[in-house]
Amino acid sequence: MIIIYIVFMSLALYHRNKSTYIYFKTLTSATFVLNGIYHGYCNQNYILIPALIGFLIGDIMLASKLRRNFLYGMGGFFLADIWLTYVLYQLKSVVIYDFILSLLVIIFVTVISKHPKMHLGHYRRPMYGYGFVLALAVSNSMGCYLMYETRSYLILTVGMAFYFISDFLLMFQYFYKTDYREILKIAKMLFYFVGAYMIACSVGV
């Protein structure tokens, strides 16, 4: 499965500026959903499948040419993040430390939105909500690893960290005026594809 995933990921990276990009990105996203289903079947644990499906929907929306596709894509990932947060809160109690990263994200978005090269426009408010929930999911994955110290939660935590970095890069790719947008796009895709695959594999170890 990992060989197939690497092939589709490489094709998606190669076709990133072509009309065929949506097909290869969809195949790549579908592969980590199938990988999650496979590991879920082996371990009778399908708890992360809704989040992976949310990733798939978000990927299709962001890769498409639909009007306002960025908001639609953000919606798919937002629902995935909410599900991840919900699942992880079934495994640990709420503590004040969970919200530190979310608060830092809110502060960062507020500060960076004032930079003359950053143009969030009407996306700023959705960014607040999305960033808050994503950071909460990342913090909870870390909390679960510190509590249980299993290989499964370590892989999930690293995958969530990569996913978080990819969204950080995506914000600059879409809204920051820079000559390095192509480099940002490649880096974002690499972090995201590796992170999503690790999240999908986390239930299988």
Image: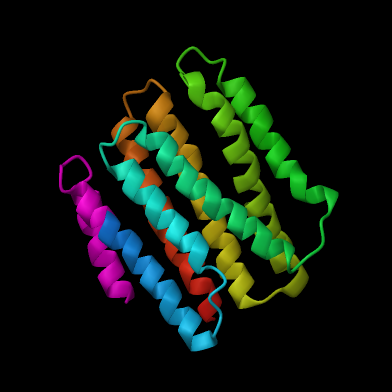
Q: Is residue 80 left or right of residue 139?
A: left
The structure residue drawn at horizontal position 57% and vertical position 71%, both measured from the top left corner, is: 47
Quadrant where the C terminus is found in the figure: bottom right
Residue at image coords 41%, 43%: 73
Q: In the picture, residue 3 is in which quadrant?
A: bottom left
Residue 51 against residue 153 in the figure, above or below: above
Q: Position of residue 42 (x, y in %)?
A: 48, 87
Q: Residue at x 55, y 20 (%)?
A: 113
Where does the image place residue 35, in percent across and percent down from the top left? Answer: 39, 74
Q: On the picture, is 9 further left or further right than 167?
A: left
Residue 102: image location, x then y, percent: 69, 41
Of the pair 200 and 70, the residue shown nearer to us: 70
- 140 drawn magenta: no
Q: Is residue 96 above or below residue 90?
A: above
Q: Nearer the viewer, residue 65 or 118?
A: 65
Side of 184 relative to 201 (left or right): left
Residue 156 in view of the camera: yes
Q: Is residue 9 visible?
A: no
The magenta-colored residue range is: 1-25
**How many marks are shown on the rendered structure?**
0
Quadrant location, the N terminus: bottom left
What secondary structure do most residues of the magenta stretch adopt?
helix
Residue drawn at 34 percent across, 60 percent down: 29
User: Is residue 17 shown in magenta?
Assistant: yes
Q: Position of residue 85 (x, y in %)?
A: 65, 56
